[in-house]
């Protein structure tokens, strides 16, 4: 017991920054590099690094006592009140000491937090206003028009307004109507407050509006009010209320972060935040398991370097690129350091969940099939795209059927996209809350919730893989003839699948191929049946030869669902552990199957032959319970016809 206590004491001495979080001021010029500070804090002193300011930050490493007065830094009052400013000297001293001689932070290394009088006065005033019993920034519904003069933001002759100001409030509204109107527009408001040298207050309302798919053509305006917050909020509430009246079709959208629109101050804050992220490490550094050294693999906007194996990083780059291409094509969204970015900003979990609810309602309508539902589907499709802002053609005569969600194919595709967006958004939000030191690759890797290990051909794990792979004589022949060549193999370990795996006996390694853009979702959630299936008379009628189950093949060569990607024409396919149990064999297709017959745990479509002709070109294995399979390996290979 005493020995254990001594070990705890020694650890606290050698790592005095345990449970402390630090933010490094990118504008400060330090005696040592940011990389050195980061490595020292994390690896030697036990602290963690945050790359955005939040209530989790304990100390800001800076050379400036005026850090909190910088208007380009996005900070809340709560951030300012908790975080203390600290000099780099503390870390330089600790670096020179033996681990057992290190000291916790003391006041001698702290920098006095100074703020200019105007900034301090603004903070205090806002604090007083927000602490009042009745929130002075609460919108009071009032659709009555209040006359006001609008000025273009670039107009020369405008009422005086100090250059330095605060954004007290903002709201984003959206209106999307698919059909003859083809409406796809947004309306954004900000309430500005400024204080001059004599502490006189000024208020202004900023608005920006236009088509969601043509933000570069949007209009921005200023409205000025007398120096009274109540009057400013009355006008703000009036503008807001007029827009959300039912006739206008606007609904408020709660984005995670508004990144594409806003006032000059809003844009400068976003630009500064992006520069902070990029300045941490412009080059992506990853750990190469083969050489034991770090490598740079690209110029990306990342939070920091990654320690993911080089080969795994390249895999991440490939599969996320395919997912991104698909998302951009269908939604005009991108996977960035802000999460899933739409035309207006990054999606929130609330938006994604509400969009899923809309898809559920569309599924109900499609299954009921009660007469003409076109108008109802148009309305629900409009609501879906309102929640997930997307580019919709601005042509007035555009065929609305291209955007209306009216088939099970489009419904399942959108459901897969929503799942992908949810996984990525959850991962990004987790990083923000925990302030974990992760870069783009880390965020994407952890979103998959799967341990991925690249297998070297000399490793025992690779030998297990290749031995089982070559048990199928078709694979041996294809490898010997050069018809296929295995480029890489990755071992996959998904804890959630290990915990729920249902062993029914008769366990085999089988193969599951899919479109390249689906691999992010497949690795994140595992292989699952379609989310939405059509039912007639209580039976599924999807056109799967053996119903709506999960399909596998017993060889890679005959897989119909892989597609080449990248310069080398790489194909990807899963080698999964599948518990078939007792198998019911079929020679004829059974598209209405909801599960295996009583007494069986899986089904098999028998491959047609000259002596035994069937409806199946290849052997098809189908399970209907996703707990009967788990991901084991991911194979990257090329076919001979695709070799360069």
Image: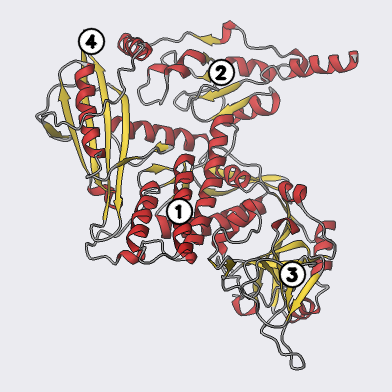
Tell me where residue 531 sits by quadrant: bottom right
Could you tell me which quadrant the N terminus lies in? top right
Could you tell me which quadrant the C terminus lies in? bottom right
Neighbor class of circle 3 (other Cα within 10 Å; few <14, some 14-19, many 20+) is: few
Q: Taking 539 as reference, is 103 left or right?
A: right
Label located before the other in sequence (3 or 2): 2
How far apart in space, not on screen, are marks 3 and 2 (Cα)? 61 Å
Label located before the other in sequence (3 or 4): 4
Q: Secondary structure at mark 4?
A: loop
Q: Secondary structure at mark 3?
A: loop
Tell me where residue 34 sits by quadrant: top right
- Residue 123 vs 254, above or below: the answer is above
What mark, if any, has residue 58 been given in the picture?
2
Q: Secondary structure at mark 2?
A: loop
Q: State the image coordinates of residue 31 (x, y, percent, origin top left).
A: 54, 22
Neighbor class of circle 4 (other Cα within 10 Å; few <14, some 14-19, many 20+) is: few
Residue with the mark numbered 1: 361
Count the labels in the image: 4
How far apart in space, not on screen, are marks 4 and 2 (Cα)? 32 Å
How far apart in space, not on screen, are marks 2 and 1 (Cα)? 46 Å
How far apart in space, not on screen, are marks 1 and 3 (Cα)? 31 Å
Residue with the mark numbered 3: 597
Which residue is farthest bottom?
A: 610
Label located before the other in sequence (2 or 1): 2
Label located before the other in sequence (1 or 3): 1
Asked whether residue 312 appears in the rendered view, the answer is yes
Circles 4 and 1 in contact, beta carbons < 8 Å: no
- Residue 397 vs 335, above or below: the answer is below
Depth check: 215 or 457 in front? Answer: 215
């Amino acid at each position: 017991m005493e020995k254990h206590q001594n070990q705890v004491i020694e650890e606290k001495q050698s790592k005095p920054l345990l449970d402390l979080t630090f933010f490094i001021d990118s504008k400060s010029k330090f005696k040592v590099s940011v990389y050195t500070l980061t490595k020292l804090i994390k690896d030697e002193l036990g602290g963690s690094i945050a790359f955005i300011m939040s209530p989790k930050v304990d100390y800001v490493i800076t050379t400036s006592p005026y850090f909190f007065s910088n208007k380009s830094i996005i900070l809340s009052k709560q951030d300012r009140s908790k975080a203390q400013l600290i000099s780099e000297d503390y870390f330089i001293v600790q670096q020179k000491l033996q681990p057992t001689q290190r000291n916790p932070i003391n006041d001698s290394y702290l920098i006095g937090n100074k703020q200019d009088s105007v900034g301090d006065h603004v903070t205090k005033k806002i604090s007083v206003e927000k602490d009042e019993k009745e929130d002075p920034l609460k919108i009071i519904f009032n659709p009555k028009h209040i006359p006001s003069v609008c000025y273009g933001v670039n107009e020369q002759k405008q009422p005086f307004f100090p250059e330095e100001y605060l954004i007290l409030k903002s709201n984003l509204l959206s209106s999307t109507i698919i059909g003859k109107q083809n409406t796809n527009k947004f309306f954004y408001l900000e309430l500005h407050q400024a204080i001059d040298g004599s502490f006189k207050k000024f208020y202004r309302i900023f608005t920006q509006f236009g088509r969601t798919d043509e933000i570069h053509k949007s209009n921005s305006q200023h409205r000025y009010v007398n120096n009274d917050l109540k009057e400013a909020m009355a006008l703000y509430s009036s503008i807001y209320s007029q827009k959300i009246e039912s006739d206008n079709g606007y609904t408020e959208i709660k984005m995670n972060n508004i990144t594409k629109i806003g006032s000059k101050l809003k844009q400068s804050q976003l630009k500064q935040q992006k520069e902070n992220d990029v300045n941490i490490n412009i080059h992506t550094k990853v750990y190469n398991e083969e050489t034991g050294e770090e490598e740079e693999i690209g110029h990306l906007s990342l939070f920091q370097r990654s320690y993911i194996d080089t080969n795994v990083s390249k895999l991440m780059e490939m599969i996320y690129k395919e997912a991104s291409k698909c998302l951009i094509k269908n939604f005009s969204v991108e996977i960035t350091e802000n999460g899933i970015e739409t035309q207006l900003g990054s999606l929130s979990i609330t938006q994604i969940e509400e969009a899923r609810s809309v898809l559920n309602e569309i599924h109900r309508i499609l299954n009921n099939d009660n007469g003409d539902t076109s108008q109802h589907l148009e309305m629900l499709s409009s609501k879906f795209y309102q929640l997930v802002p997307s580019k919709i053609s601005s042509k007035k005569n555009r065929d609305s059927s291209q955007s209306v969600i009216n088939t099970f194919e489009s419904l399942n595709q959108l459901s897969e996209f929503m799942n992908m967006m949810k996984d990525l958004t959850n991962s990004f939000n987790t990083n923000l809350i925990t302030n974990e030191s992760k870069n783009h690759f880390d965020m994407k890797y952890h979103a998959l919730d799967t341990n991925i290990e690249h297998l070297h051909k000399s490793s025992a794990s690779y030998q297990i893989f290749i031995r089982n792979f070559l048990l199928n004589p078709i694979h041996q022949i294809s490898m010997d003839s050069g018809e296929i060549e295995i480029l890489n193999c990755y071992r996959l370990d998904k804890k959630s699948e290990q915990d729920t795996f249902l062993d029914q006996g008769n366990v085999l390694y089988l193969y599951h191929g899919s479109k390249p853009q689906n691999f992010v979702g497949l690795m994140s959630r595992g292989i699952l049946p379609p989310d939405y299936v059509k039912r007639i008379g209580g039976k599924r009628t999807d056109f799967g030869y053996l119903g709506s189950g999960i399909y596998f093949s017993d060889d890679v060569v005959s897989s119909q669902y892989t597609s080449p990607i990248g310069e080398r024409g790489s194909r990807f396919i899963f080698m999964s552990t599948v518990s078939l149990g007792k198998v019911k064999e079929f020679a004829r297709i059974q598209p209405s199957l909801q599960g295996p017959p009583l007494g069986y745990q899986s089904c098999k479509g028998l491959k047609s032959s000259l002596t035994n002709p069937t409806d199946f070109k290849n052997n098809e294995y189908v399970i209907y319970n996703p707990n009967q399979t788990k991901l084991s390996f991911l194979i990257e290979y090329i076919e001979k016809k695709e070799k360069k």
